Amino acid sequence: MDSSSQSAETATGHHWTLDNNPNATIIGVMRSVKPPPESASDPLVLTEVDRSDPMPLHDQVAAEIRRAIAEGEAGPGDRVPQAKDLAAVLGVNTNTVLRALRVLRDEGLLELGRGRAIVVAGTPERGAVVARMREFLDFARSQGYRRDEVLTMMESLP
């Protein structure tokens, strides 16, 4: 900048520059009000699925996302990339990723919605407890108990 130019920062964090010439322009640059989320700088590190593995692809995808969350690459409240982006990274069809995301949602690990971001809702430990509870509920139903009866029994336990 030459000596005929002035630059300053206002109290609100705006920067401005004024050139001292007849065709002067003011250029304002505003700092970001809200810093980018921490997870934006530390994305999930996922590896491609193994097509030679007998485990279904959607289960491999779910396991890979579960592992990334368990290793702290994303925590509760953090956003997960869109299904199409995950599919590209993992080398699978978007529908395979969507199926895996539904599995993780059913485990209580993720929250998903139409047109909304995918957000980590819980921890892998919580997901494991939810999975066991589902197994237990299925077992109780196979023994002739209704859901409300099972809940009543659980509430009566010390």
Image: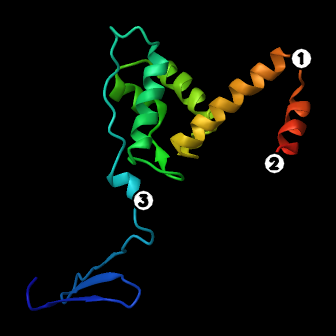
SS of the residue under disc 2: loop
Front-most of 39 and 134? 134
C-alpha separation, residue under disc 3 versus residue under disc 1: 48 Å
For label 1, the crowd category at 10 Å Cα-Cα, with few meaning under 14, some 14 to 19 and many 20 or more, is: few
Left or right relative to 158: residue 117:
left
SS of the residue under disc 1: loop
Between disc 3 and disc 1, whose residue precedes?
Answer: 3
Left or right relative to 100: residue 15:
left
Between disc 2 and disc 1, whose residue precedes?
Answer: 1
Image x and y of residue 117, in percent: 55, 44
Q: Is residue 112 above or below residue 101?
A: below
* Residue located beneath label 2 in the image: 158
What residue do we see at 89% from left, 23% from top? 145
What residue do we see at 41% from left, 86% from top? 12
* Residue located beneath label 1 in the image: 144
| Label placed on residue 37 | 3
Image x and y of residue 22, in percent: 21, 86
Q: Quadrant of the N terminus?
A: bottom left
Left or right relative to 131: residue 90:
left
| Label placed on residue 7 | none
Front-most of 98 and 75? 75
Front-most of 148 and 28? 148
C-alpha separation, residue under disc 2 versus residue under disc 1: 23 Å
Question: Identity of the amino acid at label 3?
Answer: Pro
C-alpha separation, residue under disc 3 versus residue under disc 2: 42 Å
Closest to the camera, between mark 3 and mark 2, is 2
Closest to the camera, between mark 2 and mark 1, is 2
Image x and y of residue 123, in percent: 53, 45
Question: Identity of the amino acid at label 1?
Answer: Gly
Labelled pair 2, 1 in contact (Cβ < 8 Å): no
